[in-house]
Image: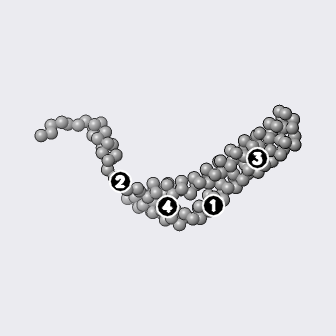
Amino acid sequence: MNTYQASERDQRKAEDIRRQYVSREENKMEQLQKLDSKVKLPGKIVGSILGVIGALVMGAGMSLVMVWGNMTMGLALSIPGLAVLLLGFLSYYLITGSRKKKYAAEIMRLSNDVMNKEGAQNER
């Protein structure tokens, strides 16, 4: 016989622990967020890497010009650094744009499902 009466706090704790062991299915909103991240993340990574490299190279060239007065070497380093920096922006837009086209149909389907489900709940 179980005579223990759990307090409300204990019951919430037990439910939280129980949820960790129960397998659950992903809902549509979680799928939509994962898919959106899958579309944007590769472009962000490549663009960020190129942007940081370009900024560092350009900064090194600028320091050659300003600190040591070496104009030709500084410009020879700064201009390619600026090009790489701009290439970072371009790569972000190209990669993200191509992935948006690739996943557009699935994202639209999931977002319509989520919006229709929310709309049906709001009407109640």
Sequence order check, earlier mark of 4 and 1: 1
Kindly report the distance in space between the C-alpha atoms of the residues bearing marks 4 and 3. Answer: 40 Å
Mark seen at residue 111: 4
Give the residue type that dot 4 points to: Ser
Q: Residue at x 83, y 46 (%)?
A: 76
Amino acid under disc 1: Gly
Residue linked to disc 2: 24
Q: Please name the residue that numbered disc 3 is placed on.
A: 81
- Numbered disc 1: secondary structure: helix
Nearest to N terminus: mark 1 or mark 2: 2
Q: Of the residues tagged 4 and 1, which is closer to the observer?
A: 1
The percent coordinates of residue 27 (x first, y second) are 41, 56
Q: Position of residue 96 (x, y in %)?
A: 62, 58
Q: CA distance from mark 4 to mark 1?
A: 19 Å
Quadrant containing the N terminus is top left
Quadrant into which the C terminus falls: bottom left
Please report whichever mark, 3 or 2, sits nearer to the chain's N-terminal start: 2
- Which of label 3 and label 2 is nearer to you? 3
- Name the outermost residue toward the left: 1
Residue 12 locus on image (x, y percent): 30, 40
Upstream in sequence: badge 1 or badge 3: 3
Q: Is residue 109 above or below residue 42?
A: below
12 horizontally vs 41: left or right: left
Q: Secondary structure at mark 4?
A: helix
For disc 1, the marked residue is 97
